[in-house]
Amino acid sequence: MLRPNKHSHPDQTVLAASTVLLAELRRKRAVPYGDLKAVLDKASRGSDFLFTPAMNLLYLLGLVEYRATADLFEYAGK
């Protein structure tokens, strides 16, 4: 379950990290792995541990695709 509680810092949740990553992907359409990780670190210091769960959430929702040959994530939404 991805429900925040009263002890969750708003910027340190999977939902917040997913929002930051999705905004960058919608803006650029395709972003390399390292650049996307840097965007999340810049948006919220110390949230690098949230990168993988946030990308997993976006992938499960069908919003991103990973291109292994180019090592980048591509926005797959409408």
Image: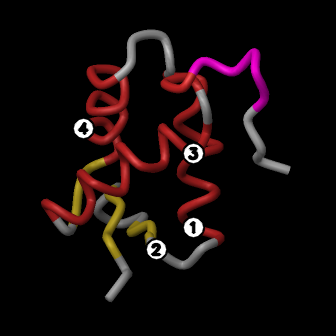
Circle 4: residue type:
Asp
Instruction: Establish if 64 lies above or below 38.
Output: below
Q: Residue at x 35, y 43 (%)?
A: 20
Q: Which residues are magenta?
A: 5-9
Q: Is residue 15 left or right of residue 78?
A: right
Q: Say which residue label 3 marks.
A: 15
Circle 1: residue type:
Tyr
State the image coordinates of residue 11 (x, y, percent, origin top left).
49, 24
State the image coordinates of residue 4 (x, y, percent, origin top left).
73, 35
Q: Say which residue label 4 marks.
A: 35
Circle 2: residue type:
Leu
| Mark 3 or 4, nearer chain start | 3
Give the numbered dot on residue 63: 2
Instruction: Establish if 32 lies above or below 41.
Output: below
| Element at label 1 | helix
Cα distance between the residues tagged 2 and 1: 6 Å
Circle 3: residue type:
Leu
Q: Residues within 10 Å of mark 2 (few under 14, many from 20)?
A: some
Q: Which residue ends up furthest to the right in the rendered image?
A: 1
| Mark 1 or 3, nearer chain start | 3
Tag 2 near tag 3, CB within 8 Å: no
Q: Say which residue label 1 marks.
A: 59
Main SS category, magenta section? loop
Q: Residues within 10 Å of mark 1 (few under 14, many from 20)?
A: some
Q: Nearer the viewer, residue 49 or 5?
A: 5
The nearer-to-camera label among 2 and 3 is: 3
| Element at label 2 | loop
